[in-house]
Amino acid sequence: MQRNSYIDFMRAIAIILMVAFHFVWDLNHFGYIRADIPNGFFWKELRAVIVSLFLFSVGASLVYSYQGGISSKKLYWRLFKISSAAFLVTLSSLITLPEHWIYFGVLHFIAVATFLLVWLVGKPKLALLLSMLTFTAYIVLDIPWNWPFNYIQGYISKHPSDLVTPFPWLALPLLGIWATHFRIFALGPANQKAISPYVTSLSRHSLLIYLLHQPLLFAGFSAIEWLN
């Protein structure tokens, strides 16, 4: 996949903020601090920033991966990896947080958004229009906070620890598809800003970090609690 240093930097920032966010969440969960996370002031806004950075970069990645044409094999492999990772998130949350298990978090959303939006990689104006309509609908219409899962709320977690719904979040990858057609994102590697290889590595391995960081943090705090 073609890489862009600006998107790599954006994704790396999202990864760092996410790890910090979950570290504080674990501190609160294990009783070391008291914080209204993730719904309190600042924490709710920080989560929105983190999710926005991730989802914008998802739209950009679709353009870099498929602007030369959509390969079914490549697309299905991408969907398989993300869907498998999403399943692992659901399974681990059922074990560790049965009252707040995740049925449609960031990775679930990315898998669905990839399937729905990959066909728009060569249509930036349409992507922008759909992004604006999605966000406008979120503001104007009285959409339930957990739509469309409100129709099956008797069978799922009432308060999932992570939930990313179509409104307003589909607006972000759509915006990423549109913005990636600007010249700043279309520059070849030789003309991009040089960034640290550590930043590139964080971006390149973002899925692995996403999957491993919270189980490792949770296991570490659990071990400390057991020892004490």
Image (cartoon, rainbow, N blue to C red):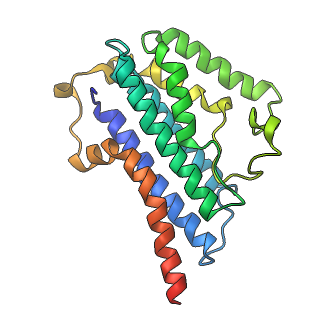
Instruction: Give the image location of residue 73, x and y in percent.
Output: 36, 22
Instruction: Give the image location of residue 27, x and y in percent.
Output: 56, 72
Instruction: Give the image location of residue 46, x and y in percent.
Output: 57, 50
Residue 52 located left or right of residue 149:
left
Residue 43 located left or right of residue 70:
right
User: Residue sitting at 39 percent across and 52 percent down?
Assistant: 209
Nearest the viewer among 9 and 204 is 204
User: Residue sitting at 61 percent across and 16 percent down?
Assistant: 130
Nearest the viewer among 21 and 45 is 21
Instruction: Give the image location of residue 2, x and y in percent.
Output: 27, 26
User: Residue sitting at 54 percent across and 51 percent down?
Assistant: 89
- Identity of the residue furthest to the bottom in this view: 228
- Quadrant where the N terminus sits is top left
User: Residue sitting at 36 percent across and 34 percent down?
Assistant: 7
Above or below for 119 versus 9 = above
Disc tally is: 0
Residue 21 located left or right of residue 72:
right
Residue 130 in sight: yes
Above or below for 81 versus 46 = above
Above or below for 66 versus 3 = above
Residue 53 in sight: no
Above or below for 109 versus 134 = below
Give the image quarter of residue 204: top left
